[in-house]
């Protein structure tokens, strides 16, 4: 089969690799009909995340048709059309039993990204996301093996729903939704979203769904901000033009700040020259710039929700400011399986239209070009969807 493989920083290649096969009774083999390039895939593309090996198959946002199924698979069957969550979860462990699927204790044989790990078991394995998370082949391919198929794949029985409408149930839509739930906002609330990438856009859509009144969107790509304003009614701030977005937000919220902030950028947030140097030298894990802005922009007693990916040390983390303001923090990988059914219902009713963020549609064979478009923000690229067949 054809699959997109990682060969090094800024080097991804379409190669012919062996077809996947069933390895456990709870596996399925999926014929991929649609897959997407995620913002967190760009961390791998840039070589910023350890644990990648040459030849690893990328991709964790995908869906398709069940081609084969192990003897113990009961939730889906051959011919079913399904969306697959990016986390691989057993459904039976301590954390899965509590709906915390991203914390599954049994599906990741590797160490994960915790530095001060002690004897804590690793969290869930993930598709196409390094050998810190199990080294599972990803879905930017013609076929993929999906373990734990009784827990992950969500069947799409409504044939009227297109792949593009439901594809993002695999990651960015539940991630944006969980970020809003973690922010504890609702009717009449105010919210600042740092990062107008796909997750930030999905957070804005879900915030509107839940009745948030004011949404501030902070980014430095003007075309993204323009889209957020038009699609979600966001009040936009370009930090290339506004030196201190948090100060601007505070000034327009009666000198209090917003009820909550969502940090949807992660560890590669743009920082100062010193912060960039320290990060490149591996002395820090991130500049911390977006996180500092989120802390500053949030009112006393508010919440900072962090769906952006982080690992290791964070530069100049103003914990004292967060303490003085009595802020709450909620963060972590998304418990996708927990949110997929409800979000599918919202899509079916027309409450959510996640597909509107798609800017580029390419055949899988042009995936390397898709990465270049997304990385360089060429042609006002917001989101790339790839079709293998």
Image: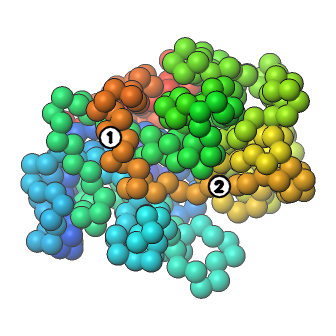
User: What's the coloring here?
Assistant: rainbow
Residue at left offset 49%, top offset 31%: 209
When asked about the image quadrant of residue 235, the answer is: top right
Q: Is residue 361 left or right of residue 377?
A: left
* Whether residue 143 is visible: no
Foreground residue among 217 and 328? 328
Residue at left offset 11%, top offset 57%: 77
Vertical placement of residue 104 versus 231, above or below: below
Foreground residue among 233 and 163? 233
At which x and y percent is residue 273?
Answer: 84, 40
At which x and y percent is residue 47?
Answer: 58, 51
Disc 2 marks which residue? 330
When asked about the image quadrant of residue 300, the answer is: top right
Disc 1 marks which residue? 344
Q: Residues within 10 Å of mark 1 (few under 14, many from 20)?
A: some
Q: CA distance from mark 1 to mark 2?
A: 24 Å
């Amino acid at each position: 089969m054809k699959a997109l493989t990682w060969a090094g920083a800024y080097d991804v290649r379409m190669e012919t690799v062996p077809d996947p096969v069933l390895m456990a009774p709870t596996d399925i083999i999926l014929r991929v009909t649609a897959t997407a390039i995620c913002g967190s895939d760009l961390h791998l593309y840039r070589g910023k995340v350890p644990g990648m090996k040459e030849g690893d198959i990328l991709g964790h946002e995908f869906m398709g048709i069940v081609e084969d199924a192990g003897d113990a698979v009961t939730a889906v069957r051959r011919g079913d059309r399904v969306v697959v969550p990016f986390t691989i979860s057993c459904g039976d462990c301590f954390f899965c039993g509590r709906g915390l699927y991203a914390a599954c204790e049994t599906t990741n044989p590797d160490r994960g990204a915790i530095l001060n790990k002690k004897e804590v078991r690793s969290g869930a394995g993930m598709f196409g996301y390094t050998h810190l998370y199990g080294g599972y082949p990803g879905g930017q391919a013609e076929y993929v093996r999906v373990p734990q198929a009784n827990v992950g794949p969500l069947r799409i029985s409504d044939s009227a729903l297109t792949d593009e409408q439901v594809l993002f149930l695999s990651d960015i839509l539940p991630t944006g939704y969980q970020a809003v739930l973690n922010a504890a906002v609702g009717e009449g609330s105010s919210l600042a979203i740092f990062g107008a990438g796909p997750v930030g856009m999905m957070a804005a859509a879900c915030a509107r769904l839940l009745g948030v009144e004011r949404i501030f969107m902070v980014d430095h790509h003007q075309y993204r901000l323009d889209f957020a304003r038009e699609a979600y009614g966001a009040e936009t701030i370009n930090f290339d033009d506004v030196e201190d977005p948090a100060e601007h937000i505070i000034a327009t919220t009666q000198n209090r700040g917003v009820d909550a902030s969502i940090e949807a950028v992660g560890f590669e947030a743009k920082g100062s020259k010193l912060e960039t140097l320290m990060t490149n030298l591996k002395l820090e894990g991130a500049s911390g710039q977006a996180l500092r802005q989120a802390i500053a922009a949030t009112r006393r007693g508010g919440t900072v929700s962090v769906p952006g990916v982080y690992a290791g040390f964070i530069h100049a983390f103003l914990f004292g400011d967060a303490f003085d303001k009595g802020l709450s923090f909620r963060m972590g990988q998304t418990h996708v399986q927990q949110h997929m059914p409800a979000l599918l219902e919202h899509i079916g009713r027309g409450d959510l239209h996640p597909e509107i963020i798609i800017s580029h549609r390419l055949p899988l064979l042009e995936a390397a070009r898709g990465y270049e478009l997304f990385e360089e923000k060429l042609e006002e690229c917001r989101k790339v969807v790839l079709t293998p067949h």
